[in-house]
Amino acid sequence: MFTELETFILSIIQTLFDAWGWLGVAALLTFENATGITPSEIILGLAGWMLIAEHQLPPSMIFLGGLYAAIGSVIGASITYWVARLGGRPMINKLARWARINPVHVTRVEYQLQRWGIGLVLVGRVIPGIRTLISIPA
C-alpha cells in the first residue's frame, strides 16, 4: 500500500519537475509554505536528485535551484501571513477549528509573540512544522 503511494507521489513530482523544471520547485515550495502539507526537505532533496543528477546538470545549478526555492518559500509564507493579516482573528479561529487547533494554543502563541517579538519568528521559521504556523501570529 505504501509502496504504491510512494511510487504515485514520486511519479507526480517527476512529471512536475520534468515539465516545469525549477519553476516546479518554486511552485511546490510556495504550496508547502502556504499550507505546511508537504515537507520542503523532501521537495528540495528530490529536486536535487531529479533535476541535477537525472538531467546531468552542472553542480552550479544548485545555486539557481536555491534561488527558485527561496522565491517559492517567500511567496508561500507571504500568502499565509497576508491571509491571517487581512482575515484577522475570525479567519484565525476558522482555520484553527479546521486544523483542530485548540483556541487556547492560539492565544498562548500570540502572548509569546508579544513577549519575544521578531526573535520568535526567526527561530520558528527554521523549525520544520512550525515554519508555516509562525506566519499566522506574526
Image: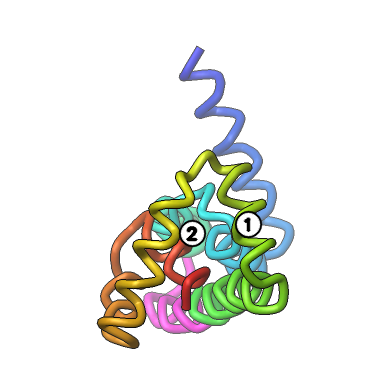
Tell me the amino acid under the disc marked 2.
Ala
Residue 127 locus on image (x, y percent): 29, 63
**Horizontal side of residue 104 vs 32, given as left or right:** left
Tell me the amino acid under the disc marked 1.
Phe
The image quadrant that residue 123 belongs to is bottom left
Residue drawn at x 54%, y 28% as measured from the top left: 7
Please provide the residue range marked out in magenta.
56-67
Tell me if mark 1 has few (under 14), some (14-19) or many (20+) residues whose alpha carbon lies within 10 angstroms of its own: some
In front of the other: 21 or 71: 71
- In the picture, the disc for residue 135 is none
The image quadrant that residue 12 belongs to is top right
> Dot 2: what SS?
helix
Q: Which residue is mark 1?
A: 17
Q: Eyeballing the image, is 92 above or below 101?
A: below
- The answer to whether residue 22 shows anywhere in this view is no
Residue drawn at x 32%, y 70% as measured from the top left: 124
Identify the coloring.
rainbow
Tags 2 and 1 in contact by the CB under 8 Å rule? yes
- The answer to whether residue 91 shows anywhere in this view is yes
Q: Eyeballing the image, is 87 above or below 32?
A: below
Q: Residue 59: within the magenta?
A: yes
In front of the other: 37 or 6: 37
Residue 72 locus on image (x, y percent): 58, 74
Disc 2 or 1, which lies upstream in sequence? 1
> Dot 1: what SS?
helix
Residue 62 locus on image (x, y percent): 41, 76
Q: Residue 18: within the magenta?
A: no
- Label 2 to label 1: alpha-carbon separation: 7 Å
In front of the other: 86 or 123: 86
Residue drawn at x 48%, y 55% as measured from the top left: 43
Q: Which residue is mark 2?
A: 47
